[in-house]
Amino acid sequence: MAQAMTIAEKILARHAGLDEVTPGQLIECDLDIVHANDITAPIAIDVCREISSRVFDPEKVVLVPDHYAPNKDIKSAEQVKKLRDFAYEQKLAHYFEIGCMGVEHALLPEQGIVVPGDLTIGADSHTCTYGALGAFSTGMGSTDVGVAFATGRAWFKVPPSIQVVLEGEFCPDVYAKDLILTLIGMLGVDGALYQAIEFTGPAVQSISMDGRFTISNMAIEAGAKVGLFEVDDVTRAYMNGRAQRAWTEYHPDEEAHYAKTIRMNLGEIGPTVALPHLPSNTVPAASCAELEIDQAVIGSCTNGRIEDMRVAAEILRGHTVAEGVRCIIIPATQDVYRRCVHEGLMDVFLDANCAVSTPTCGPCLGGHMGVLAAGERAISTTNRNFVGRMGHKSSEVVLASPAVAAASAIMGYVCTPAQVQ
């Protein structure tokens, strides 16, 4: 009798050419997509050249300059030029230059480059985002990715899986970001170390694709290799007309073994923030009224999609950002930017005295477009708030949903939408 397997185990087994795999097993797999950005690709390109004069498949290697793009200085311009030259030399099908690019983990799903059932690696830790599509996607170092550029293969240790069963319904002003912050607070930053998190349960169907991307994106903040959602009608509707190739659905077996099962009732979650300096340092947003901010950032690969823009705009509509606070809005892709224009969201942002940026990772990693000075505090919809993450080592970052970030920008301190006056 065939062994019962989780989604992660089924995808890895298929790509290793095996009938079954078990947690802890070392395997070598064929890859569907390999990608890198302007920080990580230069090293990967050098490694690739040491192995081969050509990439394994120009349709499957993707380069997205998004971290320091648009180029903030000469060094970043040189890094992007290295990507650009390599992409043209190798005739890569997927190279996204300024004007048609976006933050990689929002862009690849949006463009239908990653599809359900894929095994994907990227030289960026938040590659786990694509688990929302039912793909096994995980971050690796530039050296491993460079080898994959040349060979199309990578080795894996099969991870055990944690099952997270979602039940109930979100309360008003509560979103996917609040859910994943709450889970990280429960698990800790290493509570799912080298494990796959599989989200399931009756409440999953009520979570949009944008919400699922947010949840999967931050699986790494609990140490997980990937945050997986089973393919359902929501996934299929998202992929319809978007996928660039056929996909495969993998569903867990009823008897699949999980290292742990966690049950979460969405109705018991409130607006939540992560205080400095860990994503697991979570507290209710309503308890932070004395925590003043200098800056609010709404965007990133975690919360820069159109639903996030709509939520922020609804909170900001008819208000202005508090005096002394800078609010920076960063749509994650050109398509999101365009939809903000067409839906009138840009007028809302500008009327509220927000600054709107072209798509970029920018301030998330302390790169540009919102770097913090000594002693400053930002509330941000990004995914990490480590010491010095957004600027000076004495600055602070509070992680929040777009709703809480927008409300806080209006009031000048960390708060919930219900507290906006």
Image (cartoon, rainbow, N blue to C red):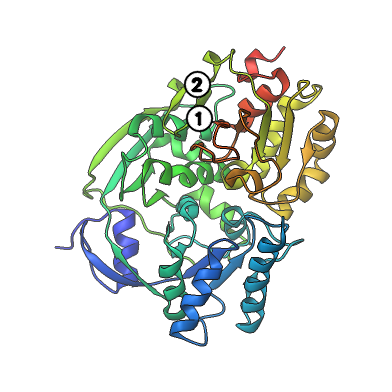
Tag 1 residue: 178
Q: CA distance from mark 1 to mark 2?
A: 7 Å
Q: Quadrant of residue 297?
A: top right
Is residue 320 in view?
yes
Residue in the image at 47% along x and 32% along y: 277
Q: Residues within 10 Å of mark 1 (few under 14, many from 20)?
A: many
* The disc label shown at residue 46, or none: none
Q: Return the x and y of residue 11 as percentages of the image width and height.
A: 35, 62
Position of residue 123 in the picture relative to residue 352 (left or right): left
Asked if residue 181 lies left or right of residue 358, the reply is left
From the top left corner, tell me how far across and down residue 322 is, in percent. 76, 21
- Residue drawn at x 70%, y 17% as measured from the top left: 411
Point 49% across, 29% down: residue: 276
Dividing the picture into quarters, in which one does residue 352 lie?
A: top right
Please give the residue where the numbered disc 2 appears in the rendered image: 270
> Is mark 1 in CB contact (under 8 Å) with mark 2?
yes
Compared across the picture, whether 364 is left or right of 280 comes to right
> 93 above or below 276?
below
Task: Please state which amino acid type lies under the numbered disc 2.
Answer: Gly
Callout 2: SS: loop
Could you tell me residue 76's position as x and y percent? 66, 61
- As shown in the figure, which amino acid type bears the numbered disc 1? Asp
335 or 6, nearer to the observer: 335
**Which quadrant would residue 111 be assigned to in this image?**
bottom right
Mark closer to the chain start, 1 or 2: 1
Query: Where does the N terminus fall, quadrant-wise?
Result: bottom left
What residue lies at 60% left-to-right and 34% top-to-bottom? 380
